Amino acid sequence: MCGIVGYVGARNCADVLVSALSKLEYRGYDSAGIAVFADGEIQIAKSKGRLADLSAKMEKEGKPEGHVGIGHTRWATHGEPTDVNSHPHRGGAYVTLVHNGIIENYKRLKEFLISEGRTFVSDTDTEVVAQLVDYHYHGDPLAAIADTMREVTGSFALGILFADFPNKIFAVRRGSPLIVGKGENESFIASDVPAILKYTKQYYLLEHDEIAVLTDKGTEFYDTRFVPIQKELLTADWDMDAAEKQGYEHFMLKEIHEQPESILRTVTPRIEDGLPSLAECGITPEKIKEFRNIYIVACGTAMHAGMVGKYVIEKLARVPVIVDIASEFRYREPLIGEGDLIIIISQSGETADSLEAMRLAKKLGAKTLAIVNAKGSSIAREADMLIYTHAGPEIAVASTKAYMVQIAVMYLFGFELALAKGKITEEECRRLTALLLETPGYIEKILARKDELHTIAESLVKAESLLYIGRGLDYALSMEGSLKLKEISYIHSEAYAAGELKHGTISLIYDGMPVIAVDTQKALHEKTVSNIKEVKARGAMTILVCGDSYAPEKDIADYCFRLPEIDDLLMPMMGVVPLQLIAYYASVMRGNDVDKPRNLAKSVTVE
Ligand code: F6R
């Protein structure tokens, strides 16, 4: 999704803006631009493509030299990724702005502005809001912003320059995230903290409908009735190192390797006397045992973590769990209400569909529990109860370590709920909790065998399509393996419940088609083996991911990756690692942009 930055201070503004935007590249974008007060006017440089294209353009055509400006990486929604549609956009003589999010009523506003004699050069909703601010501007920027906020609908964040105020940046948000950084005689705006970490760790979180006015001396905050607001200054607990690659070829590889540490950071503080304790997150045994139904609502990988959660909670605590895709949940009049718990899982905490699903559940009277990685994000702030995952910043678009800690939290929650409901004994709960703490050590061992997974990736990299199959928890895992492969390698794949294949999908199998069979559940092993035989007999090239005590008949697997065995219930934490690495190597071998796959964005703040 789009990224916004802004700078006011003594440094060369264009350099700061480009450097800050480079830290938001992970969000996904297809054009970039900056606007800087230079030589008494607002000068704009923008280009479709990568930041490198923008820098090359500025090298050739001249870089705006100044100390106050805004910048943007655009992930196209309204209008193609072209130079003209790139941000910043001018709104007339006075206003230039950058925008993240969607202006829902832009068509109506555009018609109105055209009727007022205004003309447009781009297809974007951004230019409409720029023109609207300019239309309302009569010498007072705050009034122009407030008037605009009254007329626009949607979820967005804006960074604005007014030609009459060359020492100031104005910013406002509704829905989309925006932070304001505070340095020594310099101030920043950014869509996310990594953009400013090189310069400062101190920042404010801009809230819904708050306006920030930044100068090099600091920032003033107002509501839309111009009442000044005092805000808490926060300190980021990440450092630059955490947001850099540290010698790994890609962020994704680094993040896969960070999984053992992320689990420990997430799980250890939530264990007391050998038992899970989520009290600091607002979750007590008395509170959770009363819930009638549990819904887990999320998108993509986070939803797959929810699938694991469903198995764990239903198996241990015997509470029905419905897993829903957030974009579906919202529009099917869900049957939830008082007495139900809705768990929202999100790495970014800003995913529009998940956020809106949570708001809807709240409105319907359900209690909400958010499992979120990004501190201070919208979902984290609006939930009734909150468990932060401590994966640290996840930069690669493909989620790996965030998924790992999401499922780690699902286990903690499932264990605590099962104990609270008297469905497992304290002894069993202690045993499972201790095993959870052992998973990082096992994962380290899997990571040390990367070469085997490189070989497996070689065997499928030329395939046009493949299948992932599994049963129970292995099916949930297959979904995640399949998504990981397709999003970064661009090889089509599908995950199927192994037993369901023969009801149609098995007709897809052709000679040599790769099928990755996940077979980590002892209780289902024989059944899964039968399904593997079915695809093998029809010519599939099979790759088996199984526990290390299995001795599969030689002829069912062309490749076999054995996992350290731990309790069946915890096997997804082992099993996902080879699936992530197979996808990673396949993407590298195909020469793809692993960390920034085409068409994708890290934080999906539009519906
Ligand atoms: C896939 C991936 C996405 C996200 C999804 C939800 O690797 O990263 O499928 O899981 O967009 O994002 P969050 O977790 O930020 O709500």
Image: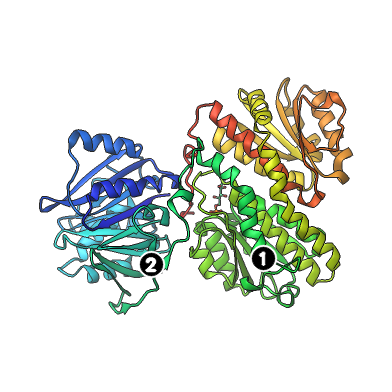
Marks 1/2: CA–CA distance: 28 Å
Q: Secondary structure at mark 1?
A: helix
Q: Secondary structure at mark 2?
A: strand
Q: x, y percentage for residue 378?
A: 49, 64
Q: Earlier in the sequence, mark 1 or mark 2?
A: 2
Q: How many marks?
A: 2
User: Going 58% across and 35% down the picture, which residue do you hit?
Assistant: 584
User: Going 67% across and 69% down the picture, which residue do you hit?
Assistant: 278
Q: x, y percentage for residue 162?
A: 19, 60
Work out whether residue 602 or residue 186 is closer to the camera in this orientation and state it.
186
Q: Hey, which residue is sitting farthest left in the picture?
A: 40
Q: x, y percentage for residue 348?
A: 51, 56
Q: From the viewer's perspective, tell me whether residue 547 is left or right of residue 592.
A: right
Work out whether residue 228 or residue 472 is closer to the camera in this orientation and state it.
228
Q: From the viewer's perspective, tell me whether residue 331 is left or right of residue 36.
A: right
Q: From the viewer's perspective, tell me whether residue 239 is left or right of residue 299.
A: left
Per the image, the residue denoted by label 1 is 270
Question: What residue type is disc 2 on?
Answer: Tyr
Question: What residue type is disc 1 on?
Answer: Arg
